[in-house]
Amino acid sequence: MAKYRVVLCGGGTGGHYYPVLSVAQRLAEEYETEFLYFTIAGRLDDERVEMDLPNVRKIPLKLKGLLRPIYNPKNIGIILEHLEQMRLVKEEISKFKPDFLFSSGGYVSFPVVLAAKKLDIPIFLHEQNALPGIANKRLAKYATKVFISFEESASRFGKYAYKTCLTGNPVRKVSMSREEIFNTLEFDPTKPFIVVMGGSQGSDFINEKMLQLYSSICDDDGYQFLHVTGKGSNMEDFRKYPFVRVFEYIPNIHEYMAKADLVISRGGATSVAEIMNYRRKAIIIPWSGAAENHQYYNAVSLEKVGLGYVILENAVTPELLLSRIRDSLRKKTVVVPYEKEPVELIVENLFREESR
Ligand SMILES: CC(=O)N[C@H]1[C@@H](OP(=O)(O)OP(=O)(O)OC[C@H]2O[C@@H](n3ccc(=O)[nH]c3=O)[C@H](O)[C@@H]2O)O[C@H](CO)[C@@H](O)[C@@H]1O
């Protein structure tokens, strides 16, 4: 078996972490691979990566994202911290001698990509959103390839558009059966199963609207909900309803999504990708505060392939949600035309001759 050494970064939120994890897990399955993961100290990637990935050494970086507006004077201190961390990253990468770097963007990627560039390590970037993030746009010039999830992202990389390669957003492999899922949740397999989640950090907005909905229906309506609240919610509010199972966070929520009859979610790119890849029906409520409204564009892409309804925050009522739930459950699933799974396409491209 071929041996590889791979540097990874991408984290803070699940939206950045899980695409990297899915590619890394696939690499680990196919090749003997050692990983060096630059995490953001104290965040999801830092907490989880040693549990999720074999042969990984993590190096937590003490980093903050730049404050908006960008000319905030505190940003000078933040940039100095990034430069300081870059020295450490460069030392670690040069000792590790990797074959390449795979990064999913976000502010952690600045010191890691810049250090890799200085050491002449091939750099592969992945962009999850329809509207690319600042880090990926700025760092594209150093990349060998920029994997994109939506066709329309290419032109947003300007003169580096030629480096883009449309692969989609990779998702984690599924291994649980529907029976196992229903047994775990103690749900009735003959009734519809709905997953509700607000992205990796949860959504107070979705929690509140769904609580209103739960209070307006009863057990006899037959719906069964798995609701992920995010940290700090009052779980007792949800436990009042016998048809709701509630958790703050479920590390393998993708297994449950993959078997759900319907997913109600924010429009984070990776949640949307999971819905697409697992060919689930969905109701998406994009977070209106997302930079350049990017969650809305992610959500629309799902609506276009016939898998979802988009409901804007200001239109959400328990009545509309219930009517969309009924419509969605009645609708036939449309199969998304993926010729190849995103994770396959990415791994294939990482090893193409011209990428070296
Ligand atoms: C508030 C914020 O900054 N949101 C951004 C962040 O979203 P956020 O991190 O919320 O990302 P996504 O919705 O894209 O992805 C969430 C990921 O976390 C997983 N998950 C979630 C809950 C749980 O209990 N267990 C679990 O594993 C989901 O399955 C999914 O893989 O990154 C995305 C990708 O760049 C962006 O599109 C979002 O706009």
Image (cartoon, rainbow, N blue to C red):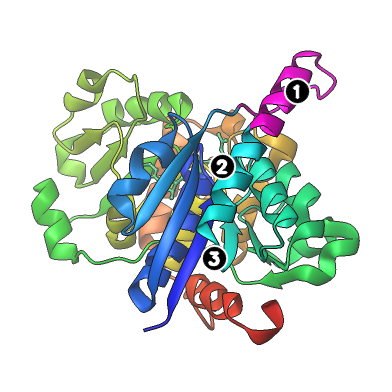
Q: Residue furthest right?
A: 159
Name which of mark 3 and mark 1 comes first in the sequence: 1
Identify the residue shown where x is 62% and y is 52%.
Answer: 298
Quick check: is 78 in the magenta stretch? yes
Q: Which secondary structure lies at badge 2? A: loop
C-alpha gap between disc 3 and disc 1: 36 Å
Which of the 4 quarters of the picture holds residue 214? top left
| Whole-percent x, y for residue 184 in the image | 11, 50
Q: Which residue is mark 2?
A: 311
Identify the residue shown where x is 82% and y is 58%.
Answer: 141
Task: Out of 281 and 126, give the one closest to the viewer.
Answer: 126
Task: Out of 185 and 18, give the one closest to the viewer.
Answer: 18
Q: Which residue is mark 3?
A: 306
Q: Residues within 10 Å of mark 3 (few under 14, many from 20)?
A: some
| Range of magenta residues | 64-84
Asked if labels 2 and 3 touch by Cβ distance under 8 angstroms, the answer is no
The kind of residue on which mark 2 rests is Ile
C-alpha gap between disc 3 and disc 2: 14 Å
Report the side of 230 relative to 347 (left or right).
Answer: left
The kind of residue on which mark 1 rests is Arg
In this rendering, which labeled residue sits more in front, label 2 or label 1?
A: 1
Q: Residue furthest top?
A: 73
Any mark on residue 68, and which? 1
| Whole-percent x, y for residue 127 in the image | 65, 56
| Whole-percent x, y for residue 310 in the image | 57, 48
Report the side of 156 relative to 303 (left or right).
Answer: right
